[in-house]
Amino acid sequence: MMSTYLFNFFRLSLVLAAGLSISSLTSTALAGATAPGSAFSDSATAGGAQGGDARGQYLLAKKYRDGDGILRNLNRAKHWFERSAQQGFAPAQIDLGQMYARGLGMDVNYSKAVYWFGKAADQGYAVAQFNLANMYRRGLGVKQDEAKAFQLYLQAAEQDFAEAQYNLGLMYSNGMGVEKDLQKASEWMSKSAKLGMARAQYQMGKLYQDGEGVQQDLVQAVYWYRRASLSGHADGYRDAELLKVKLTEQQQVQLDKLVLGESMAAN
C-alpha cells in the first residue's frame, strides 16, 4: 500500500531544479544555477560581457531575463547565455537549458535543453545532473531511461542535493531504474529530510508510521510530520495531530524530549 502511494506521488513530484522556485513544466519544475560572486555593477557586467568574459555574459543574460535594472528582453538573454555557455560556463549552460525546456522567448526544445544540461552535468554540477535526470526519467528530448535517471540522481544526491535525494528515495521505494530496496529508500529520504525538504520530512513520517524500510515508531512519525508542517507541508500538521492522540503517555514524554533536544541543538 505504501509503495503504491509513493509511486503515485512520485509521478507528480519530479522536479527540474532552477533556483528551486520556478513554475512547473508538465510535472516538473526547473532549477538554475547561481554564479559565484554575482554582485557586479551594471557597467562592469556590460563591459565584461562585451569583452568576452563568460561570467559577465552570464550576469548580463540574467539581467535581461529577469528585467533586473534593465528592460526585460528574452532574446538578448538567450544571446548572452549562449555566448557564456559556449565558453563552457556551467551556470549559463544550466540556465540556457532552462530557457529551452520552458520555452522562454522561444519554442520549447527539449533536445537542446538536454544538450546544455548535459554539458553542465559533465562538469559535476548537481543542479544540472538533477535536471538531466528528470529529462531521462520523463523521456523529454531523450529516450526514456529510468536507469540513467537513477545514476544522475545519485550523482546529484551525493553532493547533498536534497531534491535528488528525495527522488532517489522514491525510486528505491518503487524499484524504478534500480532494484526495489525500502531500507535504501528510507536512508535517502532521511538525508533529504534532514536538509529541510518538506516533502521528504512528510514521507519520513509515513515511513515511520507504516514501518516501511524502518522499524515502526509512532514517536518518530509524529516528529517528522511536525517537521514537515514547520517546513510548509500542507498535510504535516493534520497527520501529526491525528497520530499524536494515539501515543501512550510514555511515548508523549519521548516526543517532548525529542522536540526539546532539537530546540536546544538549534540554539
Image (tube, rainbow, N blue to C red):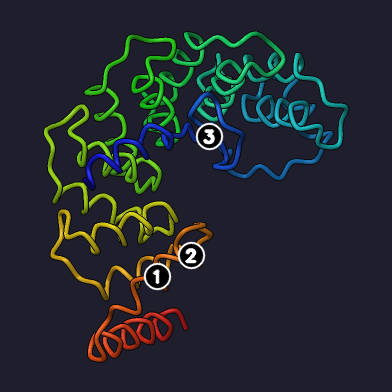
Q: Amino acid at mark 2?
A: Ser
Q: Residues within 10 Å of mark 3 (few under 14, many from 20)?
A: many
Q: Amino acid at mark 1?
A: Ala
Query: Which label was assigned to residue 10?
Result: none
The residue to which callout 1 is attached is 240
Quadrant in the picture for residue 51:
top right
The residue to which callout 2 is attached is 229
Helix, strand or loop under label 1? helix
Q: What residue lies at 27% left-to-right and 71% top-to-bottom?
A: 220
The answer to whether marks 3 and 2 mark residues whose Cβ atoms lie closer than 8 Å is no
Q: Amino acid at mark 3?
A: Ala
The residue to which callout 3 is attached is 31
Helix, strand or loop under label 2? helix
Helix, strand or loop under label 3? loop
> Number of callouts in the render?
3
Measured along the vertical axis of the image, is residue 72 above or below residue 113? Answer: below
Measured along the vertical axis of the image, is residue 229 above or below residue 247? Answer: above
Measured along the vertical axis of the image, is residue 56 above or below residue 76? Answer: below
Q: What residue lies at 78% left-to-right and 34% top-to-bottom?
A: 44
Compute the Cα span from label 3 to label 1. 31 Å
- Marks 3 and 1, the one that precedes in the sequence: 3
- Marks 2 and 1, the one that precedes in the sequence: 2
Horizontal and vertical percent position of residue 62: 70, 30
Quadrant in the picture for residue 46:
top right
Quadrant in the picture for residue 213:
bottom left
Horizontal and vertical percent position of residue 140: 43, 14
Left or right: residue 119 versus residue 214 is right
